[in-house]
Image: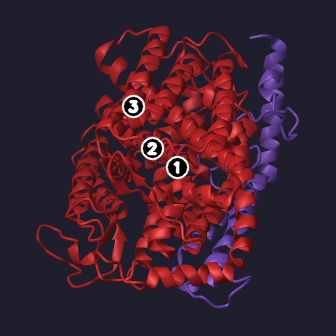
Chain colours: A red, B purple
Amino acid sequence: MIQWVELSVFVVLFLVVTVMGFIASRWQRGGGLDHLDEWGLGGRKFGSWITWFLVGGDLYTAYTFVAVPALMFGAGAMGFFALPYTVILYPIVFLPVLRLWSVSRVHGYVTPADFVRGRYGSSLLAFLVAVTGIVATMPYIALQLVGLEAVLRTMGLNGTGIAGHLPLLVAFVILAVYTYQSGLRAPALIAFVKDILIYLVILVAVIYLPAKFGGWSDIFGAASDKLAQPSPATGKPAGSILLTGNNQLQYITLALGSALALFLYPHSLTGVLASRGRDVLKRNMVALPAYSLLLGLLALLGYVAIAAGSKPITNNATGRPDTNTIIPVLFDGQFPDWFAGVAFAAIGIGALVPAAIMSIAAANLWTRNIYKEYIHRSATPSQEARQAKLASLVVKFGAVAFVLFVDPQFSIDLQLIGGVIILQTLPAVAIALYTRWLHRWALVAGWLVGMAYGMYLLYLIPNPATGRAHFGGSALTLDKLTVFGWHPFAGSQVQIYVGFVALILNLVVAVVVSAVLHAMKVGNGADATQGPDYHADEHSKRLKPVADVLTH
Amino acid sequence: MRASEAGSWRKAEAQADRRRSNRGVMAAHEGRSGFRWSPWNLLLLVPLLMLVTPWFNSTDPVVFGMPFFYWSQFLWVPVGVVCVLVVYLRTKGDGEYAPDVDDRVDDLDEGARR
């Protein structure tokens, strides 16, 4: 059954942002778009408001808005990790992000891998960081499509086979074309619409819905009862509204690990590097938690869905119920059609903004750290921009192909792996902002070990609820933790976040190998940066002019 | 470079220096990595206390029907904001050659102003 009213509202709002996406190429235009500073970073001059909407639209994606309540719906209190994650995020990244902005602005760096290249003079290390970034970002883009599709299917566009994916394909072709044309300015402009709609919808939802279901007391009661029922697959309760002795450590390490990882993702740094100055970033670190509040309230809607008795829709392409449809289903059942349409548009547009920024970030990495480094060393800035535009198309259609031809579950698994692997670039990117004591070869070694160990641990995790033997989640029971066959915590059922374990091992290897290499006096490459570069602010004469000819 | 521009830069630099010394940002032991330290930065550690889950992993006291676990974590949002805000205000102008332009909250079309 196609919901015509909802679909009409959705289509109208979608058309509005499409027009905005095309107009964006003329918005605040500095020079031509044939330079990465312009196409890929919007001219590096976004102020506080634009940055707030852009970074907010970038970090709090449609998938987040769909998946976090779905996690609460399925597992209870564990899903609430999203709140501590986004609260500790800004205090943690406040200082390093400022340093990265300054040094990138002085040297004209466009990607985090550019910085690593300059800091260590090592194109190999930069290559590893770039590849990690691209691999971690790709499934993230695919997940935005999953979020968008959840909405489209709830509105009744739930066909079978490839035809069932057609609406998604149409939406994405439009996105690809205007991102190609307008670059980062398109998502920056659209983010205004997205965030205003999201705020509107969620504020209405959290005020209206709890009252409708007898207040929070009844909602938590219903959630508690439902989560305590034994799941048919495992015979154990699905979750609880409080943390248990076994998942507290997972809650803590997942929140901390996610906070450490977020600004290592290339798309987050794209938003940061596009801003005008240090004060713009500082103000944003103060103001961005407004979204965290929203995310916490939204998470609770997962419990509201339990109280409302919402049932996830079966995805006709895969034949399985998709818990990610739980929030769309809740809105569909509880709101008048026109408002549900607005809500769906908010989620749909909320998928387009991060998808655009992520594809731009991945394209920048490809162009700067692989194409220019290994394929066409003498590329001019305009050739770079052209390459990046093409790469953004390839990245987006790669993501569509993923959703079309591969089980969406695979994207979810890959995104899980993405969080673990992006964390492994922390020593090379974040710690290198402060010190060069970690040796470049030690960083390579730490990256390799952290990566391999993280993947191995993920492989060990089963998911009894879905009947999968491997890659069943990111929560590792300490019982399974092995170091060359030795189980240091045998028998323990306490869970921990895999990415965190892998990062610790990565750091240990990096420190030990660095100590050895320093003792052996192995060369540590040339550092192109200087102390004061890390504090340069707007108007400093250290800054490289925007859209200047880029050199390494 | 025009002479007037150089002049305004020197002025901005002097102002930034004054601001730095006023706010106790120490640039004294600046090494090769340009590390700078302000004691205010320690405030950024406070929100990490939120990670001590045993403090709030309980149902009681319930407020507006919401268990303690949930509403207490919402309270950490303003705590985080205040900590970052204080650090921002106390380290304003710690950047090199901070602009001597006005510090007003910028408007939507600020990009066009430049």
Query: Which is nearer the eye, A418 or A71?
Result: A71
Q: Distance between the residues labelled 3 and 1?
A: 46 Å
User: Which numbered tag is attached to residue A117?
Assistant: 3
Instruction: Read off the residue under disc 2.
Output: A158
Residue at point 68%, 66% (across, down): B77
Residue displayed at 42% across by 17% down: A390
Q: Do the residues labelled 1 and 2 touch (CB within 8 Å)?
A: yes
Q: How crowded is mark 1: few (under 14 residues within 10 Å), some or many (20 or more)?
A: many
Residue A55 seen in this snapshot: no
Residue A145: give x, y in percent of width and height.
Answer: 46, 40
- Secondary structure beneath disc 3? helix
Q: Answer above or below: position of A500 versus B31.
A: below
Q: Which chain carries label 1?
A: A
Q: Residue A214 appears at what percent x and percent y?
A: 71, 79
Left or right side of B107 for A142: left
> Residue A3 placed where, x, y %?
59, 45
Which secondary structure, mark 2? loop
Q: Quadrant of residue A187?
A: top right
- Using the image, determine if residue A513 lies above or below residue A113: below
Labelled disc at residue A347: none
Q: How crowded is mark 3: few (under 14 residues within 10 Å), some or many (20 or more)?
A: many
Disc marking residue A154: 1
Q: Which chain carries label 3?
A: A
Three-letter code for the amino acid on which mark 3 is drawn: Arg
**What is the three-letter code of the residue carrying label 2?**
Asn
Up-down: is A453 above or below A152?
below
